[in-house]
Amino acid sequence: MEARFRIAPPPCFFIKGTVAYSALYTPLTLTWNIRSKSSAEQFSRLPTCAIPQNHNVWHYHDEIEFILILEGKGTFFIGDCITPFSAGDCVLIGSNVPHYWLFDEEYLLPESDTRANVVVAHFLRDFVGQVFWSLPELSPIRRLIEYSKDGIMCRCSDKNLENSFLRLMATSGLERILALLHTLHIFDQHPDKEKLVSADYNIQYHDDDMNRMNLILGFINDSYKVHVHLDEVADLSGMTKNSFCRFFKQKTGRTLTDFVTKLRISNAQKILGNTHGSIKEACYESGFNNLVSFHKAFKSITGNTPKAYREMFWKQSL
């Protein structure tokens, strides 16, 4: 059974190795895909493809997606969640949950020497068959797969999980099935897993929505550090302002203002956590016009003030 990807441009996913981005067409090797065919398990390597933009596309697919960031920083967009990622972060995304991920600008510039390194595995929910899944010993992994519909993230995963993930990508046949189960088990045992998608998020997508959403999200990602005006986005999407607001809320679970604010705070989190820049710099480099609104939004979304967040982040990294 071939994978049924429903996206705008061709699906692009990454296998272990250096991924160099450019602003034009960059060939990318796809991951190994783990899928079932009738009663037998089959592993196939997908062909090389190219993406016509410097970020991944908003998409969804039947396969569960398992991602480990080895090098690089950026932002995950998973369901109605917008959250920063960095090296060591690991995410499990459930079947048909809309998502994409965007690396920071330093990884996208053609002249940049900064590299991203990511491994991704795709597999169908029943890749070992229903009878095997019914074993009581597999109940923790069954629950993990069920909860993946909410998007599950482990930040700063340990070497044990990383090594298991890399072994998964290097094996084949029966060893690959066992390696995947082992990697999922280690992921499930991680003490700091967090759910990403809101409990009431239940967005049903149609194929025709994907092109429009990618156009909208591409514009927002290119503009949020400066300004995002409703008139411009509605005009770009070919809708009236009222129609656009309804469409965007239906597809993302957020208003345009909420979405842009969350994206700006996600960028500020990366600045505060990965640089020695001032809080003022984090504010203005993320698209806020004044410190008062920045502090209010940051506290509302993260539960901490910018100062407390930075202190907490650096203590955890020691």
Image (cartoon, rainbow, N blue to C red):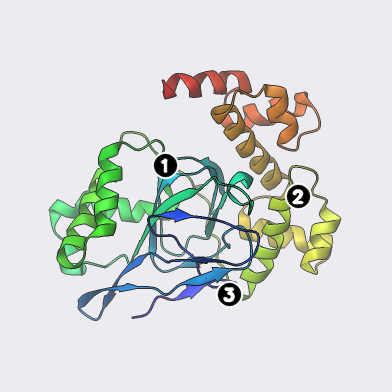
Residue carrying label 3 = 207
Mark pair 3, 1: CA separation:
30 Å
Quadrant for the C terminus in the image: top left
Mark pair 1, 2: CA separation:
26 Å
Tell me the amino acid under the disc marked 3: Asp
Q: Earlier in the sequence, mark 2 or mark 3?
A: 3
Mark pair 2, 3: CA separation:
26 Å
- Front residue of 173 and 180: 173
8 lies above or below 110: below
Mark 3 element type: helix
Nearer to us: label 3 or label 1: 1
Tell me the amino acid under the disc marked 2: Ser
Is 73 on the left-hand or right-hand side of 17?
A: right
Asked where in the image residue 242 lies, by quadrant, the reply is bottom right
- Front residue of 295 and 282: 282
96 lies above or below 162: below
Nearer to us: label 2 or label 3: 2
Question: In the image, what residue occupies the spot 65% across and 24% down?
Answer: 277
Query: Any mark on residue 252, and which?
Result: none
Residue carrying label 1 = 89
Q: Residues within 10 Å of mark 3 (few under 14, many from 20)?
A: few
Q: Earlier in the sequence, mark 1 or mark 2?
A: 1
Residue carrying label 2 = 223
